[in-house]
Image (cartoon, grey):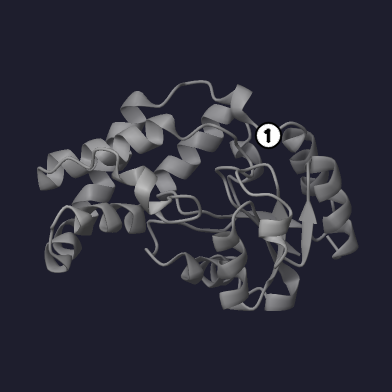
Amino acid sequence: MLLLFDIDGTLLSGATKAHSQALDRAIREVHHVDPGDLRKQIGPAGRTDGEIARLMLLDLGVSARRIDELAAEVREKCCEIYAQISPPDLSDHVVPGMSELLAWLAGRDGVTLGLVTGNFEVIARLKLKHAGIGRWFSAGPGGFGSDSEDRAALPAIARRRAGQIPREQAIVIGDTPRDIACARADGVRCVAVTTGQYGVDELSDADAVARDTGELRLRLEELGA
């Protein structure tokens, strides 16, 4: 069983400040425009970093062609800035009970932990390292915002990196309707958690919904993890 975790709102809570600042600074330095408060208007939850940057830049009048031409530069600059300004200790942002759940899952036969996140991979790895839970994912497969702007493409990328894991043996765990949508796009199951900004009703399209890590463990067991 391949369990593909989202990061922000799922594994970690409230750990996006430096990440947002890094992306905004990268946009300013590369495109010489100021995103200001546009992030709030586009609703970044569940989007990839590249998509967030694109939506802000389009709003600022930057052409799609120019965005494409400089996408790699924005990504590299964002990761560079985040490495400089990221808090060295994010352990207090780990969702309560998540460390224990990951340890339990890692000890189960046939279970592989992986990631499906809109974060650029460098930022994703640094966040988890600074939060003290990176060891559970260090050897695991993943799909990241640096792989595609399209969140829906990421579960398939992660499954391929895991050795072409069949769809019926993969589960996405996330906290937003976009996490559910990306799982549906790849034909894999999804367990949603209310540890982010969305409630049970808003996440009802998932195969199961958990209110906390205790319920998440039960839901994953019911689905065969």
Locate residue 40, reporting x and y percent. 38, 44
Residue 33 vertical placement versus 162 (above, below): above
Image quadrant assignment for residue 181: bottom right
Locate residue 225, reporting x and y percent. 83, 60
Give the residue displayed 63% in from the left and 38% down from the top.
135
Amino acid beneath label 1: Val
Q: Going by the image, does 47 lie left or right of 3?
A: left
Residue 157 vertical placement versus 199 (above, below): below
Q: Going by the image, does 225 lie left or right of 76?
A: right
Q: Going by the image, does 103 lie left or right of 119?
A: right
Give the residue displayed 63% in from the left and 45% down from the top.
10
Give the residue displayed 76% in from the left and 67% down from the top.
207
Image quadrant assignment for residue 170: bottom right
Locate residue 103, reporting x and y percent. 78, 39
Q: How many discs mark residues in the rendered view? A: 1
Give the residue displayed 34% in from the left and 25% down from the top.
85
SS of the residue under disc 1: loop
Q: Nearer the viewer, residue 45 or 104?
A: 45
Q: Nearer the viewer, residue 2 or 178?
A: 178
- Residue identified by numbered label 1: 95
Label 1 crowd (10 A; few <14 / some 14-19 / many >=20): some
Quadrant in the picture for the N terminus: bottom right
Locate residue 192, reporting x and y percent. 70, 56
Residue 154 vertical placement versus 35 (above, below): below
